[in-house]
Amino acid sequence: MKSKHLAKLLTLAAAALAVVALAAPVAQAATPAKGYEAFAGCPSPEEKAGLVFCLHSKVTGGNFKMGNKSVPISNPINISGGFEEITGGANPELKGFAANSKGGLEPVKQLVPGGVIGITGLDWLVNFLNLEGLKLYAVTELAGVPKLTFGQIDLPIKVHLINPVLGSSCYVGSFASPINLHLTVGTTSPPLPNKPISGSPPEFGFNEALEILLLENGKFVDNSFSAPGASGCTLTLFGFIPISINGLVNTASGLPSAAGKNEAIQEIDAEIAVRERVYP
């Protein structure tokens, strides 16, 4: 395969997490052919005309650190959809993404070490909550449109902190003030105290029987971004007295956190098939 084609496919793998999730779901999903079940989120020709390729991607591991809290990606995140074309020369751009009702970015909870007590400092909560109630989860959501260039994803996100104690709208980052990631397969140049870290491009393979291109073990990194303070975190006392605890969350988590104190690592696998094979 020519290098220019490899460059375009590498960009596709890097962008899978960002772009497929942005596509507005298309109504009722069709059923892929046998062996292509992983591409169920890719719209069929009846659902959306003009798509050429189907994609399934998975974030298999890594971690996300902001302030003094580090969250391992222990539950894989699936992303699936389809796209029309890859355009551009040295900096190819992915265009025309879409996903049906089974596709897009899967909202997966990741367990936050230290739980709700660790992120609020409210030790007395242990007397009122059971073990499950003390757990805290983080879900990454998009907070804008990513910009894609070769080997990098500029990805605006927000992190939803989930626990009944925090209310339903406790976030770090927002559409107005996102966490801007610049994930790369290269080497970073972060402000101190962080030191440079390196990603790595995926390994290419091919499933000849199904004609599926495989991109495995890609590593995308960024440790130069900043993180804003928490917002919308509300403790309700006695069931009806709301009290903002944004300050407690910020103090316990080291937020807001300046550039050079945070880190994002994503390990990504992807597979790509021509849509005519998925929906013959």
Image (spheres, grey):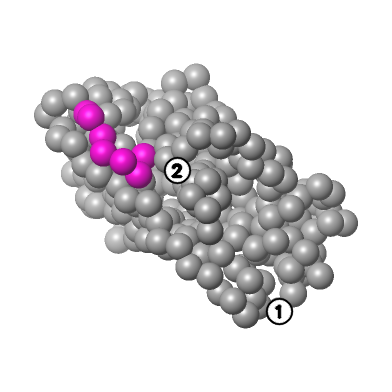
C-alpha distance separating marks 1 and 2: 32 Å
Q: Please rate how many residues cluster around mark 1, counting C-alpha atoms within 10 Å: few if below 14, some from 14 to 19, many from 20.
A: few
**Amino acid type, residue under disc 1 in the picture:** Lys
Question: Where is the C terminus found, in terms of image quarters?
Answer: bottom right
Disc sitting over residue 34 in the figure? 1
- Residue that extends furthest to the right in the rendered view of this protein: 46
Query: What's drawn in magenta, residue-wise?
Result: 184-190
Q: Position of residue 203 (x, y in %)?
A: 40, 61
Instruction: Name which residue lies at 21% across and 41% down.
Output: 197
Q: Nearer the viewer, residue 167 or 49?
A: 49
Q: Nearer the viewer, residue 254 or 95?
A: 95
Query: To which residue does mark 2 refer?
Result: 140
Q: Main secondary structure of the magenta part?
A: loop
Quarter of the image for residue 102 reads bottom right
Q: Position of residue 151 (x, y in %)?
A: 42, 40
Q: Position of residue 135 (x, y in %)?
A: 32, 54
Of labels 1 and 2, earlier in sequence is: 1
Q: Position of residue 80 (x, y in %)?
A: 61, 56
Instruction: Name which residue lies at 63% across and 42% down.
Output: 86
